[in-house]
Amino acid sequence: MPHGRLIQQPAIWDRLKSLNPAFRCALIGWEHYVQPNCDIVVGCRPGRWALWPVVPQFYIKPQKLFHQMCAEWEELKDIFFHKEKAMPSRLLDIDAEISQVNQWILRIAQWIEQHEKPHLTLVSLPALAYQMPRKGLQQEAIARELQEIDAIFGQLMELYTDAQVQVIVISDSVYHSVNQPVYINRILREEGLLEVMHQFGQEFLDVWESKAFVVTDQQLAHVYVRDRQVLRKLKDLCREIDGVAEIWDRTHKRSHYFSHLRTGDLVLLAAPHYWFAYDYWIDQQAAPFMHYAIAHANSVPETAKPYYFSKPATANEHKALHGEEQHAFHTSSSLQAAAGSFLGAPPTHAPFIAAQIPLPEAISPVEVYRYILQACKA
């Protein structure tokens, strides 16, 4: 989903409002929930603040809706207006806090469907995305989480089925264990391409003086080059790095629908079991203060980093997961098995999509937008 005005692609609700000015959309539970032009936005997630335990984090618009919800739900009112009840002194452990967020998302979806009845409701259930990196990918480790999401999903299906609302089920990630970091920025520093500033006994990335630096994102690395003369040298260097499986230049990015200016001059893909670490400091004592704050807030073990693939699923794989008919739904009782089958799944399984509309032979993540739009227009 677009975040603010950074994304140039029109949001789904903007496209549909252009066809029908009376169209209304609700966005519930999404992590990036500051969305312009969306009629109803209720963000509800566990907020991982630096040096604090997990806390419930909410964002609600419009203000009228905010006051209506607070008037009906005393617990929600406490979180917004009573510091002693909202701060860490009242917090549960992280598992209980995430379970509470699941229940909040369900209750909010029920309330909005009952009172507002938007034309399109987008509901995110992010609990597994929080728990899998923490607990790993063994099904016995996350059995309770799978059962809980299965139950929430079943209640949402019942809610929208009773309201005769068409439902589309989508997942955006596939998880694989990784155990080998690639310190790509350290390599650039050793080659004289990345510069740092020394302050307060810490090292900070000097973006303006660096000839190149890398923004890492798990199995993707975005390489930004200031001095175009070193680009060819940089490509040759990346080919020699263990753990780099693919190097996308402008041509490759275009063929993968990835050719936006902000994606970088090069995009690197990690080999299986490798992931890109952003560390640019050589001595751990020189790590900047925000590194420790981020590490404390996330507490993600290296052996359980998420692995995201963007290759399409084939028709046979859709049939295996969705049933013989490609447009059949998972029932609640089969969702847990389906989610489990995606732990360690091959790359062709992303994204998972189930809908009561015919699906093509293969679906790329960039095409999901189009199929949601198609279902809404229908």
Image (cartoon, rainbow, N blue to C red):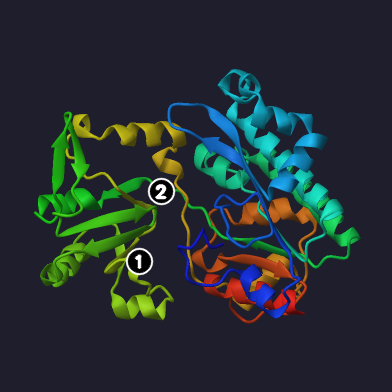
- Across and down, in percent, residue 270 comes to 34, 59
Asked if residue 339 is positioned above or below residue 290 in the image, the reply reads: below
The answer to whether residue 299 is seen in the rendering is no
Q: Is residue 219 left or right of residue 75?
A: left
Question: Disc 1 marks which amino acid?
Answer: Thr
Q: Are marks 1 and 2 in contact (CB under 8 Å)?
A: no
The quarter of the displayed image where residue 245 is located: bottom left
Residue under pointer 2: 178
Q: Is residue 79 left or right of residue 254?
A: right
Q: How many marks?
A: 2
- Across and down, in percent, residue 201 comes to 16, 29
Kindly report which numbered mark, 1 or 2, lies closer to the viewer in this rendering.
Answer: 1
Q: SS of the residue at dot 1?
A: helix
In the orientation shown, which residue stands out farthest toward the right? Answer: 162
Q: SS of the residue at dot 2?
A: loop
Asked if residue 363 is positioned above or below residue 42 in the image, the reply reads: below
Residue under pointer 1: 263
Circle 2 Cα neighbour tier, 10 Å, few/some/many (<14 / 14–19 / ≥20): many
- Across and down, in percent, residue 40 comes to 70, 55
Quadrant location of the C terminus in the rendered image: bottom right
State the residue at coordinates (62%, 26%): 86
The quarter of the displayed image where residue 116 is located: bottom right
The quarter of the displayed image where residue 214 is located: bottom left
Q: CA distance from mark 1 to mark 2?
A: 24 Å
Q: Earlier in the sequence, mark 1 or mark 2?
A: 2
Question: Disc 2 marks which amino acid?
Answer: Val
Quadrant location of the N terminus in the rendered image: bottom right
The answer to whether residue 83 is seen in the rendering is yes
Viewer-proximal residue among 34 and 264: 34
Please tell me the numbered disc located at residue 367: none
Asked if residue 108 is positioned above or below residue 326 in the image, the reply reads: above
